[in-house]
Image (cartoon, helix red, strand yellow):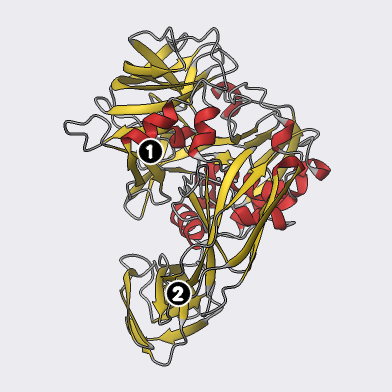
């Protein structure tokens, strides 16, 4: 799932601030996880995971019982799994604070904003509010999620905002009816995660997986968004050995297993499933059904078989009415990434990052796959031609104008005959140079001051292998002066823009735009190459903005802060 633009969580979503997510939540609850179980919901014949919480504190729920159930779409029952990108993970016994929304279909409770709405109490000690953390996700099936830590009293302050804008009525605290249950108090509840990695085995015998679309397409996107859907399928098809081919126009479908497990991916519009509340920042839900009937091992990792993929868009017209073609293309391709088995990346440069890129508003087409996206796709679907694996242990050292880069040989794949070092001005780029070497180290002198993003690929003959994650290095440079003349503007549809003038002194390699919902407390930061930043779909509110100039890693003092009101 993807969220849309200031931090939120998973699937396809608007990127919103934590305060905006809190105000869009119907309630918040702090408590301990008493049980985690999976079961079929007989009303819709889909799998859900039911998380039972012993309630310690509740916000926005004046009639909250001492124990309630949070119902999450997806889970595993027997040899079948329904996996939704970006869902929160729960472990029996952990103490959590969760922001909650009410599912339109059956009035049960779900985590708001998926993983962005779930915090775990850590290092509490004598003070129950000492620290909280939330998972940010990972594309690597063998790697644990990255964690963000925040002060507990800060999250409690946000929790007090829940229920102040969105009211809860006729809430079901029991999670609703269940049948044919899966394991109780099982291992970590994680969807599209290391627990049950899966793939389309059709890639092993050159059989395409067809992508069907709801007849009529998306009502707010020119041409129904069909061109973006085809482009998204082609993007993943060009990455590795899996082929996604255009399918047929069909009626909408939800997550029912009997209807869904047909070996195809479907795109549906208007949330006929009634899974996404109108107040939610979620734009779309993407996921897949997995089966243990055919488990295949690649790179030492067992992968279940994907039997169907689903992408379901929300029905709130305002979320899409001003969306650019580039943003919509990113949403479709992101959700297709979930449907082929990928989770969320932890880098903003990846298509599979949990929130939309702020730069998509200026594009008429989708972003290319990032290094993390490409590595994930090739892990699941190795190219037909044998390739070297990614080198490991990439590191770099800077001494004056001399940069030394070092790494280890790949641990799998075709043995390399050499290596290719790529240097770029931003993650994934190679605009600063490409260098060939036969060794596992490379040094060069006279490097100009600036910021560089480095990665290494192994080479076997004419075949170039998978890249390492980027390593960032900075060469020289004193800090510049602060940016000047910062101004902001806003307009209909959540349009917002900020411009500024360069510093009076010093060299600048980039700018960092800091945005917060209170004076002097930035909550999100954007790295910008030029002297302006603009976007659409920004939630209404007052934002406090300041700009910092960078010379490599040397930062200026912040500019004068401005208040930007988005109507």
Residue 241 at least partly seen: no
Disc 1 crowd rating (10 Å Cα; few below 14, some 14-19, many 20+) is: many
- In primary-sequence order, the first of circles 2 and 1 is 1
Q: Is residue 563 above or below residue 478?
A: above
Residue 523 at least partly seen: yes
Question: Mark 2 highlights which residue?
Answer: 552
- Give the alpha-carbon distance from disc 2 to disc 1, as whole Å: 41 Å
Where disc 2 sits, the SS reads loop
**In the image, is 414 to the left or to the right of 540?**
left
546 or 386, which is in the foreground? Answer: 546
**In the image, is 231 to the left or to the right of 209?**
right
- Write the residue at 73% across / 34% down: 318
- Write the residue at 60% across / 46% down: 5
Q: Which mark is residue 54?
A: none
Which quadrant would residue 197 be assigned to in this image?
top left
- Residue 363 location, x and y as percent? 71, 58
Image quadrant for the C terminus?
top right
- Write the residue at 50% across / 42% down: 518
Q: Is residue 205 above or below residue 397?
A: above
Residue extending farthest to the bottom is 446
Where disc 1 sits, the SS reads loop
Say which of marks 2 and 1 sits in front.
2
Residue extending farthest to the left is 126
- Residue 284 location, x and y as percent? 61, 35
Question: Mark 1 highlights which residue?
Answer: 196
477 or 214, which is in the foreground? Answer: 477
**In the image, is 170 to the left or to the right of 365?**
left
Which quadrant would residue 314 be assigned to in this image?
top right
Q: Is residue 314 above or below residue 297?
A: above
């Amino acid at each position: 799932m993807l969220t849309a633009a200031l931090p939120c969580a998973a699937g396809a979503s608007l990127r919103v601030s934590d305060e905006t997510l809190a105000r869009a939540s119907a309630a918040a609850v702090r408590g301990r996880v008493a049980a985690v179980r999976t079961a079929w919901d007989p009303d819709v014949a889909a799998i859900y995971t039911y998380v039972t919480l012993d309630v310690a504190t509740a916000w926005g729920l004046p009639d909250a019982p001492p124990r309630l159930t949070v119902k999450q779409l997806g889970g595993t029952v027997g040899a079948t799994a329904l996996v939704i990108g970006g869902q929160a993970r729960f472990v029996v016994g952990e103490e959590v604070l969760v922001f909650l929304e009410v599912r339109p279909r059956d009035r049960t409770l779900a985590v708001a904003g998926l993983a962005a709405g779930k915090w775990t109490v850590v290092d509490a000690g004598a003070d129950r509010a000492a620290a909280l953390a939330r998972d940010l996700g990972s594309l690597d099936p063998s790697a644990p999620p990255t964690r963000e830590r925040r002060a507990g009293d800060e999250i409690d302050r946000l929790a007090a905002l829940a229920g102040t804008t969105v009211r809860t009525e006729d809430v079901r605290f029991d999670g609703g009816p269940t049948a044919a249950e899966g394991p109780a108090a099982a291992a970590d509840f994680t969807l599209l995660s290391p627990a049950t990695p899966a793939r389309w085995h059709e890639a092993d015998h050159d059989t395409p997986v067809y992508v069907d679309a709801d007849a009529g397409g998306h009502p707010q996107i020119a041409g129904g968004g069909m061109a973006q859907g085809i482009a998204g399928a082609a993007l993943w098809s060009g990455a590795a050995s899996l082929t996604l081919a255009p399918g047929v126009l069909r009626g909408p479908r939800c997550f029912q297993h009997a209807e869904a497990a047909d070996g195809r991916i479907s795109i549906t519009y208007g949330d006929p499933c009634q899974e996404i509340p109108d107040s939610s920042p979620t734009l779309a839900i993407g996921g897949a059904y997995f089966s243990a009937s055919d488990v295949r091992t690649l790179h030492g990792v067992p992968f279940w078989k994907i039997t169907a993929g689903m992408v379901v868009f929300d029905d709130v017209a305002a979320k899409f009415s001003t969306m650019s073609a580039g943003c919509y293309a990113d949403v479709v391709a992101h959700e297709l990434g979930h449907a082929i088995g990928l989770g969320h990346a932890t880098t903003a440069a990846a298509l599979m990052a949990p929130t939309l890129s702020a730069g998509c508003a200026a594009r008429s087409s989708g972003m290319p796959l990032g290094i993390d996206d490409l590595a994930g796709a090739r892990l699941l679907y190795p190219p037909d031609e044998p390739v070297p694996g990614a080198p490991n242990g990439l590191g770099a050292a800077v001494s004056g104008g001399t940069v030394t880069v070092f790494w280890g040989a790949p641990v799998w794949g075709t043995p390399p005959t050499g290596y290719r070092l790529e240097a770029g001005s931003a993650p994934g780029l190679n605009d600063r140079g490409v260098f060939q070497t036969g060794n596992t180290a490379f040094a060069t002198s006279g490097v100009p001051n600036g910021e560089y993003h480095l990665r290494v690929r192994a080479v076997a003959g004419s075949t170039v292998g998978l890249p390492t994650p980027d390593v960032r290095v900075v060469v020289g440079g004193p800090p510049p002066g602060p940016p000047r003349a910062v101004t902001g503007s806003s307009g209909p549809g959540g349009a917002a823009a900020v411009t500024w003038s360069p510093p009076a002194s010093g060299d600048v390699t980039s700018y960092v735009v800091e945005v917060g919902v209170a004076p002097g407390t930035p909550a999100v930061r954007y790295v910008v190459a030029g002297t302006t930043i603009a976007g659409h779909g920004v939630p209404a509110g007052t934002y406090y903005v300041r700009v910092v100039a960078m010379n490599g890693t040397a930062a200026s003092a912040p500019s004068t802060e401005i208040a930007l009101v988005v109507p």
